[in-house]
Image (tube, rainbow, N blue to C red):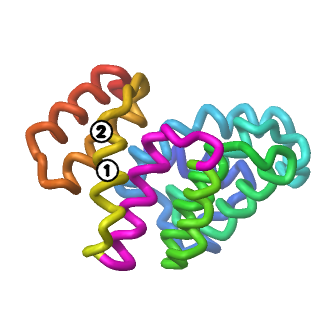
């Protein structure tokens, strides 16, 4: 399975060897890459070379950004998000993914700007709230806003596996391990993949 996914990524125009990524990806990375193979198949059907990124729709562009995050190419992830945001400045998902990529580059203030923009558009976005809190914690673990953001996140309804997992992360960060485990279990029930 690992070499098949690696081949699909390579066929999609991303030479893993040039990025010092092994031929077969470790299981933890494969688990992150697996959801994107379907998007890669769609993209390869759009363009044999995938050189013309203007053909991507918003969902495919965000999927590619998340794939680039999974393989550690944060600059390319940011580029895909910027492409979406050029067309739609209020795309919350692109703002969050971009913030995540920037956070991975340890540019915390810029990541916070992305999360703040996302929260200005959607103040009840659980993922943006939790990611902002985690980024603030990287800067200063004693920041008073962290607890407030996490507590707000856990009071909101979540219906998707991603938001339920984000809620679990909020509980985990607050030291509420049983509630965190419950959220992670619910996330897996919503989407076992």
Residue 170 in percent (x, y) is at 28, 48
Q: Is residue 142 left or right of residue 149?
A: left
Please tell me which residue lies in front, 29 or 62: 62
What residue is drawn where x is 12% and y is 47%? 176
Was residue 125 drawn as part of the magenta stretch in this picture? yes
Q: Quadrant of residue 121?
A: top right
Please tell me which residue lies in front, 124 or 2: 124
- Residue identified by numbered label 2: 154
- Residue identified by numbered label 1: 150
Q: Quadrant of residue 62?
A: top right
Number of numbered tags placed on the structure image: 2
Q: Quadrant of residue 58?
A: top right
Disc 2 is placed on an element classified as helix
Tags 1 and 2 touching, CB below 8 Å: yes
| Crowding at mark 2 (Cα within 10 Å: few <14, some 14-19, many 20+) | many
Q: Residue furthest left?
A: 178
Q: Is residue 75 above or below residue 41?
A: below
User: On residue 164, which mark appears?
Assistant: none
Residue 161 in percent (x, y) is at 39, 30
Was residue 52 drawn as part of the magenta stretch in this picture? no
């Amino acid at each position: 399975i690992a070499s098949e996914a690696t081949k699909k990524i390579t066929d999609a125009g991303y030479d893993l060897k040039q990025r010092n990524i092994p031929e077969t990806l470790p299981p933890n990375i494969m688990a992150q890459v697996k959801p994107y193979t379907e998007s890669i198949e769609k993209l390869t059907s759009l363009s044999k070379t995938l050189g013309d990124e203007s053909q991507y729709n918003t969902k495919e562009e965000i999927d590619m950004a998340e794939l680039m995050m999974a393989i550690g190419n944060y600059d390319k992830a940011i580029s895909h998000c910027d492409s979406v945001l050029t067309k739609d400045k209020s795309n919350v998902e692109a703002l969050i993914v971009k913030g995540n990529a920037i956070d991975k580059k340890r540019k915390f203030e810029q990541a916070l700007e992305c999360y703040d923009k996302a929260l200005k558009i959607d103040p009840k976005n659980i993922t943006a709230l939790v990611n902002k809190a985690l980024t603030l914690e990287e800067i200063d673990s004693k920041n008073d806003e962290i607890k407030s953001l996490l507590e707000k996140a856990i009071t909101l309804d979540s219906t998707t596996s991603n938001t339920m997992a984000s809620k679990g992360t909020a509980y985990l960060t607050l030291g509420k391990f049983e509630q965190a485990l419950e959220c992670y279990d619910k996330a897996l029930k919503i989407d076992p993949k």
